[in-house]
Image (cartoon, helix red, strand yellow):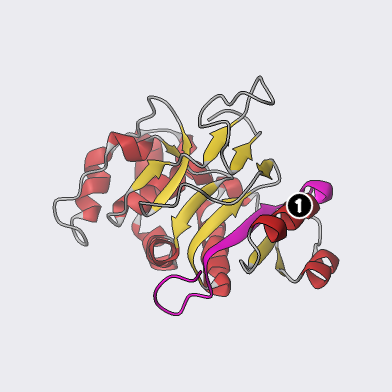
Amino acid sequence: AAGGGNYTAKYGFYIHAYGNPPAVIHQVRQLKKFFPGSPIYIMSDGGHRFDALCSLEGCMFTICPPANDRWHPWPFMRRMYDAAVALKTEYLILLEPDVTIHGPITRHPTHDAGGLHVKDRQFGLREYVEQLAQEVKPGYKWRTESMAAGLCGGSYYRTAAILDAFSDESVARLDWNYIAERGSKEIFSSDFAMQYLLAARGYDAEPWQDAAQMEKSAEIPHSGPADAAFKHYGGGL
């Protein structure tokens, strides 16, 4: 069911793709099976076209100039922002071809964003980010629990948070060179960049119990529950 406001549904799905057509086709069909009525938006980063698939399955598709945007924050955020506008849902679920869908969501979102549990992860320059957040949320603290959320395929985002934290203005507001020089080039990866952008606008993330990281075993998760709705098979976070 749709949430409050003018949302078309509670969940919308954003598939960030380049290639792997069989995986994307399977994802779309699984989403239609488990989430009937939820819109699907596929973005190709200069790779394979999915026009015919979306014509057949009723999803939205756009192809963008190749940018390897997983390592370039502005195009990554802009494309996700555009997907959120098009989907018009309360939450956006980010998917990549290395994620499988196993059922409906049974552990619904409780924060502004949520993803895979990454044990013992912390980010640098907490004070800089918290200072930015004071402008919109006085007293905000970037919690260690928030930093433990892996924001890759199989993560959720409140649309209102995307439209604020991932706007062109918010992306430009962060001093990327300052963070990279005092931290690491990892800030330019989408998983890290989204964490910083959300925290800089006072949003909270959490590890999500409906997402699991699969590594050495195809049955036993490295993190997250075995009955998670979304299972991520990419490299460990």
Whether residue 214 is visible to the viewer of this picture, yes or no, is yes
Residue found farthest to the left:
139
Q: Is residue 232 left or right of residue 25?
A: left
Residue position for label 1: 24
Span highlighted in magenta in the image: 1-23
Q: Is residue 172 left or right of residue 59?
A: left
* Residue nearest the observer in this picture, 88 or 229: 229
Q: Position of residue 102 (x, y in %)?
A: 66, 44
Tell me which residue sits at (39%, 66%) in the image.
160
Q: How many marks?
A: 1
Q: Is residue 14 magenta?
A: yes
Q: Residues within 10 Å of mark 1 (few under 14, many from 20)?
A: many
- What type is the residue that disc 1 sits on? Val
* Residue nearest the observer in this picture, 1 or 172: 1
Q: Is residue 216 left or right of residue 117?
A: right
Q: Position of residue 164 (x, y in %)?
A: 38, 66
Q: Position of residue 221 (x, y in %)?
A: 58, 26
User: With respect to residue 85, does 199 lie above or below?
Assistant: above
Tell me which residue sits at (43%, 33%) in the image.
184
